[in-house]
Amino acid sequence: MKFVKLIGFIFAAVATAFMLAGPTVAAPGGMITWGKPSEVLSTDAHLSADGTSWTMYYLIYDTLVTTTDDLKIAPGLAESWEQPTPTTYIFKLRKNAAFSSGRPLTSADVVGSLKRLADPKLGSYAGRQIGDVKQVVALDDHTVKLELKQPNTAVLSVLSVSMTAIYPIQELENGTFDPTKEMLGSGPFMVVEHRQDESWTLVRNPHYWRQGYPIVDKVLVRIIQDDAARLAGLRDGSVDIANFENPDAATLLKGILNVEPIIQKTTNYFRLDVSALQDDSPFKDIRVRHAMALALDRQRIVDAVFGGESAVDYVVPQAFGKPVCRDHPDYVTPREKRIVQARELLQEAGAENLKVGIVASSVLVTFPLIAQVMKANLADVGIDAEVQQIPVADWYQRVFSAKTDFDLALSWLAGYSNPTQILSNWNPEWVGWNAGFMTPSAEYNKAVNKVRQLPDGPERDRVIEQACQIIYDQANMLPLVSKPDYLGYRKDKIKARFSSIEGNFNTLKYITEFSRQD
């Protein structure tokens, strides 16, 4: 079989023409103020593990590739690429790309960034997702060859996330750039001021490769933790755009004059962590885990918590549009029958009149809301659940430490843009953070490794189904419902557009095209 794939060249011709043309705007310049709920937790994109930081990185850094609104791979710093073998990728870089310092970006920066990510001493999650790197070399100043030891169908998807940002390696090596303290990229904006827990001031990168963009001169990122304060900022015009976690935000935004509410579909979803290793956990018994899983009413969560604006979700996110992992009995069996089966399992396990706790951290307003619906779900099978609203630090300690102390806990997963990226989370030996409550499965790990290597198609989908069945049968970490993003912007003050589906936390993906209208 011949493995030459000129995917990138096709995308480059179309995408570059569109990007250069851009939208029609009244006038360039001005400032946009973004009301952001949370502070950036780390300036080192390669080591970051939180979505609140990832959204900021995209404004400052570039990645080799990006994604379209339908989650397809599109050109980024690499204007084109080819895949001459199943393990080899050759990227052609934009010759006019430069860091905000003015230094041209070359192959050396890409090679150095990928080597840093691949270094096991760094411990980068994104680096592990890239796979085992055999070599990464510069073929010339604007051509990079990446060769893996094994095929990884998801590698381009991984290279589209901000955790694989391209760093200025010359400055990193000579000590004039420290990613643990600052950000210096080739993206559309650059940092000129940061006030901890208050604001970030960004200005246009004058050396940005996309001619004429960004349109605005400045972005003021105000850290506003209180939902009511962000709503007030939109109302009085001191904030142009803001994002929210509260499902009520969409309704509240509709009530503000000249504010356009946006409910952005994402590949992220809420999940339920189940304690299967803790000695005193009733869920150490797989029959009790199965009974709990049968009792879940995901549609009720969608309707009661999200007003129908979420969706029942699966191991492979429904936003992918890939009809896999949806036929397990926990989903398709009528709930009345599932309730009977759950009660029978509890009786068999000697776990009738069971009392359990549901950890619902205060980090997200949605966690306690979902927990209340789950409490009612579990009551239907005779399980008495207590909702435990605890601080974030206590949540991390009780659920994600080596010695866990919980029964059930609510959390969420990032879906990204390829099934392999999310399937990796069910291997506790690989991700680490769930090793305290999840039982490893050699059979599952073997299936996921095969998924990683197979090209997209029916055979890969069949193996994905096998992996999903193991997940559902273990009932150790379960998908619940999709996690939409809520935004609002002043349509009388700015012109803006947003991706219809977002998988990589690039919430303001089109901010380079935002413009002022006032």
Image: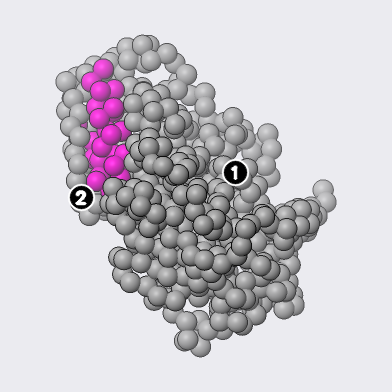
Indicate the amino acid at tag 1: Val
Which residue carries the number 2 mark? 391
Which residue carries the number 1 mark? 451
Which scheme is used to colour this image of the protein? one colour
- Is residue 312 depicted above or below 450 in this figure? above
Q: Residue at x 63, y 43 (%)?
A: 70
Residue 421 visible in the snapshot = no
Task: Report the disc number at residue 229.
Answer: none
Indicate the amino acid at tag 2: Pro
Q: Position of residue 284 (x, y in %)?
A: 27, 34
Q: Does residue 66 appear left or right of residue 518 in this picture?
A: right
Cα separation between marks 2 and 1: 37 Å
Residue placed most toward the observer, 337 or 283: 337
Q: Residue at x 76, y 57 (%)?
A: 17
Residue placed most toward the observer, 482 or 340: 482
Q: Which one is closest to the eye, mark 2 or mark 1?
A: 2
